Image (cartoon, grey):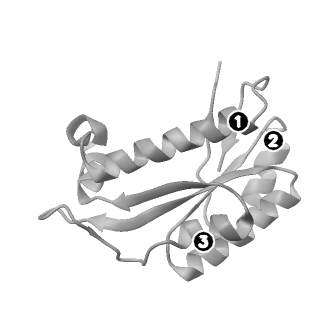
């Protein structure tokens, strides 16, 4: 049994979302992921509106690359600005699920093929990921029909 299927799609309103909805008619919701800068937020809003035309609810917005955790001091530096994901959620009238900062250690863990959480469970990035996932689960529990086993988010 599959509880969730996550499909990571490129930004914009391409045919990918339409194809997924056609191939998996039991898709129950989408999550929009954006970076904070204005041009990315514009694309995210367009994508959310396109998904709405497919009669698929948008469960929420996540702001990715929301700053970068400095490997020297641990502070977060806003490389791409901040708050774009929250603004998009407000403009769309949907939940804001949270922000996830960049962490160079996550890149290294991925390159090494080692799960990031094994070495960085106390990092700001992992805490942010955990918070976003908890918020997403709350939205799913509250708003998605639990009779369906397959739930796809993109």
Residue 29's x, y, as percent?
74, 45
Question: Position of 74 compared to 76: left or right?
Answer: left
In the image, what residue occupies the spot 79% across and 58% down? 51
Q: Which residue is mark 3?
A: 87
Residue 89's image quarter? bottom right
In the image, what residue occupies the spot 70% across and 57% down? 94
Q: Secondary structure at mark 2?
A: helix
* Distance from the alpha carbon under mark 1 to that under mark 3: 22 Å
Residue 28 is marked as none
Question: Position of 135 compared to 150: left or right?
Answer: left
Residue 23 is marked as 2
Please name which of the two marks, 2 or 1, marks the residue nearer to the observer. Answer: 1
Question: Position of 129 compared to 56: left or right?
Answer: left
Residue 142 is marked as 1
Residue 11's x, y, as percent?
62, 67
Q: Nearer the viewer, residue 88 or 24?
A: 88
User: Reading the chain from its start, which is encountered first: label 1 or label 3?
Assistant: 3
Question: Position of 144 compared to 33: left or right?
Answer: right
CB within 8 Å, label 1 to label 3: no
Q: Residue furthest top?
A: 1
In the image, what residue occupies the spot 79% across and 66% down? 49
In the image, what residue occupies the spot 29% across and 55% down? 107
Is residue 12 visible to the viewer in this orientation of the structure? no
Residue 62's x, y, as percent?
55, 57
Residue 133's x, y, as percent?
50, 41
Q: Nearer the viewer, residue 98 or 69?
A: 98
């Amino acid at each position: 049994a599959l509880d969730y299927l996550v499909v990571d799609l490129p930004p914009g309103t391409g045919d990918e979302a339409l194809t997924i909805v056609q191939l998996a008619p039991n898709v129950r919701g989408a999550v929009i992921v954006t970076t904070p800068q204005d041009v990315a937020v514009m694309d995210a809003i367009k994508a959310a509106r396109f998904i709405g035309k497919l009669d698929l609810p948008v469960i929420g917005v996540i702001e990715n690359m929301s700053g970068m955790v400095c490997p020297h001091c641990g502070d977060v530096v806003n490389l791409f600005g901040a708050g774009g994901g929250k603004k998009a959620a407000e403009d769309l009238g949907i939940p804001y699920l949270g922000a996830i900062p960049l962490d160079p250690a996550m890149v290294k863990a991925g390159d090494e093929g080692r799960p990031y959480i094994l070495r960085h469970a106390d990092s700001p990035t992992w805490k942010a990921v955990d918070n976003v996932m908890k918020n997403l689960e709350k939205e799913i529990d509250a708003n998605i029909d639990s009779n369906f086993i397959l739930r796809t988010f993109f």
